[in-house]
Amino acid sequence: MKGMVFTEFLEMVESTFSADMVDDIIDDSAPPSGGAYTSVGTYDHQELVGMVTALSARSGLPVPALIHGFGTHLFGRFHALYPRFFDGIPSAVDFLFGIESVIHTEVRKLYPDAQLPSFDCVRRDDGLDMVYASPRHFGDLAEGLITGAIAHFGDPLGLTRVNLPDGSIRFELRHKS
Ligand code: HEM
């Protein structure tokens, strides 16, 4: 996973908890890379899971909630770092419909070694269905990112998560009437 995901995570931990907490979760999880992340590097995503698990143990907050919260935070950071991806996009459904065909395709041009998930998106009259699949199983991260997108655009959309038997997840976004 790209180093920017790690640096953004540790910056969030520092601002939400403390710099000591950053040191503690790196010590606790003993990441094989050593824990000195650079945004251009690439690291095993299990190191992120290890640090989140350590943060959960120290904070008492559940791992899924921490990953979901990170996803929402990360969406705001993506908006700050990649504003051009938002040019001319009017709504959360339009943005999310293009997550694979536009956004992550552009990400892959910037970072050819990015390990990206797949999103199978189907527009509906009343919203959007997105089926998320990834060998990294970051469904909570995906849910947090989608929640961040809905909040960013301010659209009145409800979000339902359906865990499918094959391990993929269908996110159902529906306009609130
Ligand atoms: C401007 C917006 C976005 C940018 C620039 C962006 C970029 C990235 C980057 C750089 C990674 C890391 C790839 C790697 O580690 O190798 C990533 C991963 C990921 N992205 Fe996006 N992303 C954006 C929006 C979103 C949104 C809205 C979603 C949800 C619908 C999403 C879902 C994910 C997930 C779940 C991962 C983790 C990898 C996995 O699950 O396998 N991203 N993205």
Image (tube, rainbow, N blue to C red):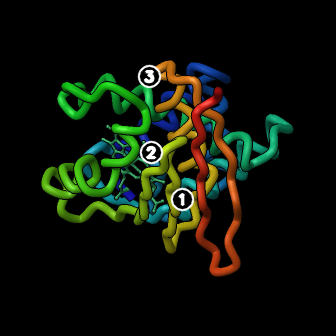
Residue 25, located in which quarter of the rendered image?
top right
Give residue 6's mark.
2
| Callout 1: SS | helix
Q: Where is residue 131 in the image (x, y as percent from the top left)?
A: 52, 63
- For disc 1, the marked residue is 47
Give residue 153's mark.
3
* Amino acid at the residue labelled 1: Glu
Location of the C terminus (image quadrant): top right
Say which of marks 3 and 1 sits in front.
Answer: 3
Give residue 74's mark.
none
Q: Could you tell me which residue is drawn at 55 percent across and 64 percent down?
A: 46
* Amino acid at the residue labelled 2: Phe
Q: Earlier in the sequence, mark 3 or mark 1?
A: 1
How far is disc 3 from disc 2 in space, using C-alphas?
A: 25 Å
**Neighbour tally class for label 1: few under 14, some 14-19, many 20 plus, Cα within 10 Å:** many
Q: Could you tell me which residue is drawn at 31 percent across and 25 percent down?
A: 90
Do the numbered discs 1 and 2 sit on residues whose CB atoms are within 8 Å? yes
Q: Which of marks 1 and 2 is nearer the N terminus?
A: 2
Q: In this view, does 13 lie above or below 166?
A: above
